Image (cartoon, rainbow, N blue to C red):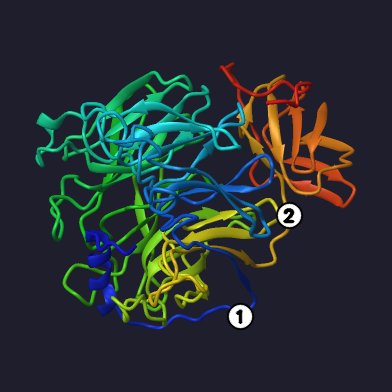
Amino acid sequence: MFKLGSWKAMVVLSVFCLAMAVASPAQTFTTLVTFVETNGSTPLFTPLIQATDGNFYGTTWEGGASNWGTVFKVTAGGDLTTLYSFCAQSNCPDGNWPQSGLVQGPDGNFYGTTSGGGTNNDGTIFKITSDGNLTTVHSFSGADGTSPTAGLIQGSNGNFYGTAHGGGNIAACPDGAGCGTVFEITPDGKLTTLHSFNGDDGSGPGALIQATDGNLYGTTNTGGVDACPNYPGCGTVFRLTPTGELTTLYSFHGADGWYPFTGLVQGTNGNFYGTTSYGGASNAYNAVGCGTFFVITPGGELTTLHSFDFTDGIFPAPFVQATDGNFYGATVGGGPNGWSPLFPSAGDGTLFEITPGGELTTLHNFDNTNGSVPWSGLVQATSGDFYGTTSQGGTGPTCGPGGCAGTVFSLSTGLAPFVKLTPASGDAGVAVTILGTDLTGTTKVTFNGKAAEFKVVSSTEIAATVPAEASTGKVEVTTLQGALSSNVPFRVELHPKVHFGRPILDPGR
């Protein structure tokens, strides 16, 4: 079950980072699911998603019927269903080793990637229904990328965008294997390579976001113009237009962090927040460091907000900006508790809260019995609580001496319920989906004070139409339990675009 990769070996180096961290006692942590290989093993890099049915969906890297990974569904109460086990056919044409999470399209289906398998064994893009019917949408072939380890996002034009960690223009990349690509793919599988990295502009791209300006933003793990410990470059932050014009906004150089693995989050203030896996001020072992949390402006001005120091974590994982304006995330290692029998001094990882100004509070320390190595970070559910996975640990009667194969957990910090819209922007007359809890009996929906037509689809979903003369602002839903506000302002666009919302009078899929 346990595979020693380079990322784990490098995290072990960070045990030399020493300091103090104070945990906050006012939290409720619950282990919901323990993976035991047959139902999945080792969920990795991307957070769970909450779907329109209110349940959570994700992938595991290994485990399942063939031990090549799974797609799963889990309820808020912890009932797990394995929807699909990869490599169901000889030579894995359906893909294997899914390292990333899923995105739900407007058709109700889920889209994701596998890092291996497919026609050329370079990875795949797949579509899967909520009842587990999987279709391979694209098989990578090297020239268009290899090993997609990050998930997809859906753009405002209805197409999906993503990255391949390797491949692309091999001749332009110093390592001879390709520095990775950014691609666009239509729901029916037509893929366009938007950019092939060449090392100087980055190598090994991770997750993307589409910002409020319509451009794509992301990070590369390595590459860039500055030398770095153990790598030809420390990584970059980049902007890419939907037509493929790339601008390197920042190249890391070690002291400010290196290996920015988790991608970016655009804050409500318009700036971008991210992490580096190594580097920073707590740098007790050569240039390794324990990682950083940073903010970067759209113009490329970067500020390090926090340097991790081992007892508050090492190797920060993906994070989210919550409804209180603070950021919540996880670190893969660090904390006061030992990380597995192989690395007893590296720490099992932590959960943390950090303000936009960089003040960090440790919310939870993993101890292997309740999980270890939380690669996926956190997602905030519409209940206000957080959900996530660990890639190792857990306890159960069928687990080995090193623990189980990972967990699903929830963390309550007392934040109130809210509603979430998809898409998060649109023009008057566009159909949108509102996600929430206890929505049955809703009496009113407003967009920045303007009343909207709506239809309650279920207790977790409302179909609404953006009203005429609506303006950018919060959406408010009046329910039998009270008023719920959207987690972010709904952005009313000034120019028409193609949107793929579901008509208000068609609650079916």
- 331 relative to 171, above or below: below
Q: Is residue 93 above or below residue 476?
A: above
In percent of width and height, residue 325 lies at: 59, 56
Classify 10 Å Cα crowding around label 2: few (below 14), some (14-19), many (20 and above). Answer: many
Front-most of residues 169 and 111: 111
Q: Amino acid at mark 2?
A: Pro
Q: Is residue 356 visible?
A: no
The residue under the point 52% across, 73% down is 396
Answer whether residue 61 is visible to the viewer in this image: yes
Instruction: Say which quadrant the N terminus sits in.
Output: bottom left
Q: In the figure, 270 relative to 364: above or below?
A: above
Judge left or right: residue 392 versus residue 258: right
Q: Position of residue 15 (x, y in %)?
A: 28, 77
Alpha carbon of mark 2 to alpha carbon of mark 1: how far?
Answer: 21 Å
Secondary element at image label 1: loop
Amino acid type, residue under disc 1 in the picture: Pro
- Crowd rating for badge 1 (residues with CA inside 10 Å; few <14, some 14–19, many 20+): few
Q: Which residue is mark 2?
A: 417
Query: At which x and y percent is residue 309?
Result: 35, 75
Pinpoint residue 65: horizontal percent, then vertical percent. Answer: 44, 49
> For mark 1, what is the residue?
25
